[in-house]
């Protein structure tokens, strides 16, 4: 208890230095937390289990696939349902902010993505209306759309002027897997217009989303699909949905790796800040430690004093930094959002534990050199020290 009191008094002896050190560590924790939130947001979809869904794209990854593949896929052993779609793009009001919109057949959309939460009446209205569309709730609130509104869109991927009618406003049961900030219009409506204006692009899809039968091996089903179109003019690549998303994220690997490096540099800065503060504190108290040695204090006592003070500063800095992270994450989400997509960052326990754990490691490492100095110091050197 006496050592704890002495450790605490040593920590607060220099209030200005303590405040600056704690503030610096808090900024380090805050910056580290924001980097981890960014990484978590990028990688979250790849961690969410969707065990019965496959994604099929062209083997090149960029070319379209013929619509005729749908019927051939449907009869492959283990396939339960086949869905398809294309990225529509589309501009509403602001040319600099295209919508995240997709053209997909309504008949299979809800079966393929049970994450969509939509009243039955709105679901049926969307299926029945060839010019109908459904929009996510945040998107509807942002633009003030209501059921029945007509939305004029300027095509980007499919040029021209398009008008769609809002037939439903949906929510998502899991936004990590299925976003609630997108617009879905009818595939038939888009394909018919394309057939009339650009016949070469008609009956082509960007991807197939396939659900396999319960109990079927998804990897075997994927292999069967690719084998069915091997050596054809449009070969396929089929993966589990999680693997497909993980592969897409991996293509941004340079950016993610850079963020990982940045998070390491941030913690290195925290280590230097704390090590400098602890070095100054021990140097100032060298004579006191010399007196303590003459009174019979052992190495373990000095370790408790120095390591305890370092961890005390780390805990204070971490607490302040994590407290600031809550409003900072909300502000960060607002700053990284645009008119087409609203970003939200949720602070989970993993981020909290990682932040605290890393800072405790920083506190322990920062105390190493001061402890080594005390171990090497003789009683006479301590008593003769000045400054």
Image (cartoon, rainbow, N blue to C red):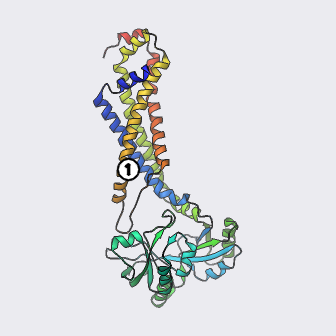
Q: Is residue 97 visible?
A: no
Residue closest to the eye, 141 or 294: 141
Q: Tell me the quarter of the picture where residue 139 sits.
A: bottom left
Q: Is residue 20 left or right of residue 60?
A: left
Element assignment for label 1? helix
Residue 285's spot in the image, x, y percent? 35, 18
Above or below: residue 165 compared with residue 42: below
- Identify which residue is drawn at 43% across, 15% down: 377
Task: Estimate the x, y position of residue 189 in percent, counting from the top left.
Answer: 47, 86
Left or right: residue 226 versus residue 37 is right
Could you tell me residue 243's position as x and y percent?
Answer: 59, 62
Q: What residue is disc 1 on? A: 326
Q: Residue at x 41, y 71 (%)?
A: 137
Quadrant (top left, top right, bottom left, bottom right) of the C terminus: top left
Residue placed most toward the observer, 46 or 111: 111
The percent position of residue 292, horizontal first and vertical second, equals 41, 13
Could you tell me which quadrant the N terminus lies in? top left
């Amino acid at each position: 208890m006496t050592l704890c009191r002495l450790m605490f008094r040593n920590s607060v002896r220099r209030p200005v230095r303590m405040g600056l050190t704690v503030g610096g560590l808090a900024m380090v924790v805050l910056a580290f937390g924001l980097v981890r939130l960014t990484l978590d947001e990028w990688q979250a979809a790849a961690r969410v289990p969707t065990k019965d869904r496959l994604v099929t794209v062209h083997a090149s990854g960029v070319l379209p696939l013929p619509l005729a593949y749908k019927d051939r896929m449907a009869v492959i052993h283990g396939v339960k349902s086949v869905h398809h779609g294309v990225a529509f793009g589309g501009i509403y009001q602001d040319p600099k902010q295209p919508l995240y919109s997709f053209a997909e057949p309504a008949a299979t959309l809800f079966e393929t993505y049970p994450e969509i939460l939509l009243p039955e009446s709105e679901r049926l209205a969307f299926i029945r209306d060839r010019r109908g569309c459904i929009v996510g709730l945040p998107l509807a609130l942002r633009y003030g759309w209501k059921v029945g509104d007509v939305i004029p869109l300027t095509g980007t991927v499919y040029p021209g002027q398009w008008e769609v009618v809002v037939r439903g406003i949906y929510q998502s049961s899991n936004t990590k897997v299925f976003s609630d900030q997108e617009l879905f219009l009818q595939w038939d409506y888009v394909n018919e217009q394309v057939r009339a204006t650009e016949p070469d692009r008609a009956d082509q899809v960007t991807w197939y989303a396939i659900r396999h039968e319960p109990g079927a091996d998804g990897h075997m089903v994927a292999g069967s699909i690719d084998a069915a179109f091997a050596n054809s003019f449009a070969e396929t690549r089929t993966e589990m949905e999680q693997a497909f998303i993980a592969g897409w994220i991996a293509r941004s690997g340079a950016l993610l790796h850079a963020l990982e490096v940045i998070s390491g540099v941030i913690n290195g800065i925290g280590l230097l800040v704390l090590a400098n503060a602890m070095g100054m504190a021990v140097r100032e108290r060298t004579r006191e430690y010399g007196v303590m040695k003459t009174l019979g204090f052992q190495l373990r006592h000095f370790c408790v004093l120095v390591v305890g003070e370092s961890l005390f500063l780390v805990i204070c800095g971490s607490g302040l930094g994590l407290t600031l992270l809550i409003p900072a994450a909300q502000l960060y989400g607002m700053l990284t959002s645009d008119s087409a997509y609203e970003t939200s960052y949720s602070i989970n326990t993993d981020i909290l534990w990682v932040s605290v754990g890393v800072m405790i490691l920083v506190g322990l490492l920062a105390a190493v050199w001061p402890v080594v100095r005390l171990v090497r110091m003789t009683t006479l050197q301590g008593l003769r020290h000045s400054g």
